[in-house]
Image (spheres, rainbow, N blue to C red):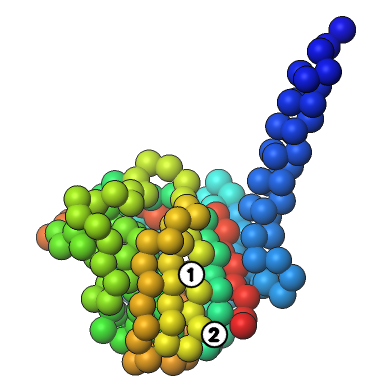
Amino acid sequence: MLHRRTIITAATALFAAWLSVGCANAPLGAGAVTLLDGDKGLENFDRIGDANWRAEGGLIVADKGKGGFLVTKSRYTDFVIYAEFWAETDTNSGIFLRASDPSSVTADNAYEVNIWDIRPDPKYATAAIVNHAAVPIPVVYKAGGRWNSFEIEARGPNVTVRFNGVLTAAMQNGKFRSGPFALQFGAGVDGALGGPIKWRKVQVKTL
């Protein structure tokens, strides 16, 4: 016969597992729109650049090309983004917010939430907002070789980034007020081909 404490512990663990699965499926709650889920969702984005975006193994993947973006077809002003992604240590990727020129997305015309563990200037490496909110050096937030999540909130001039549940960057900047957001596949160090980026889920909720 199982001891009562063992039964309670097992039940608690089962509930925790169920809760974590539920949060992964609908982390933003009511009102969230799923733009990408598994191998579905490319129809919600415009492709910019030469990255080889494709559905593969239940994911949206890019691993070749000089660089490119999946740019949302809709514009957003105040919002929360939840994204699940897998990267290598040398992957150069990110999420660009409120892009003012959707045909040519850069960190100069959007807010870039970075995914790049080995960025040459490490203060804007993974989980930073490039040119606006740095992360600690030596680099402590690393994405390479595992599944990760971003929860990014933009409300007026205030933008915050949570990487795997930890607040990593916050800023107040009113330069870019509205626009689509974009998922990046970028070149590696010195223009070399970097590692792949794999997106498993992307949701957005307007505020």
Which of the two residues, 11 or 22, is positioned nearer the viewer here? 11
Name the side, left or right, on which 160 lies relative to 77: left
Q: Residue furthest right?
A: 1
Q: Quadrant of the N terminus?
A: top right
Which residue appears at 32% of the width and 65% of the height? Answer: 128
Whether residue 77 is visible here, answered yes or no, is yes
Q: From this view, report whether residue 62 is shown above or below residue 35.
A: above
Q: Earlier in the sequence, mark 1 or mark 2?
A: 2
Name the side, left or right, on which 2 lies relative to 174: right
| Residue 37 placement (x, y as % from top left) | 62, 59
- Amino acid residing under circle 1: Ile
Q: From this view, report whether residue 150 is shown above or below residue 21.
A: below
Which residue appears at 54% of the width and 70% of the height? Answer: 81
Residue topped by disc 2: 78
Q: Quadrant of the C terminus?
A: bottom right
Q: From this view, report whether residue 32 is shown above or below residue 63.
A: below
Element under disc 1: strand
Which residue appears at 69% of the width and 60% of the height? Answer: 26
Residue topped by disc 1: 152
| Residue 3 placement (x, y as % from top left) | 81, 13
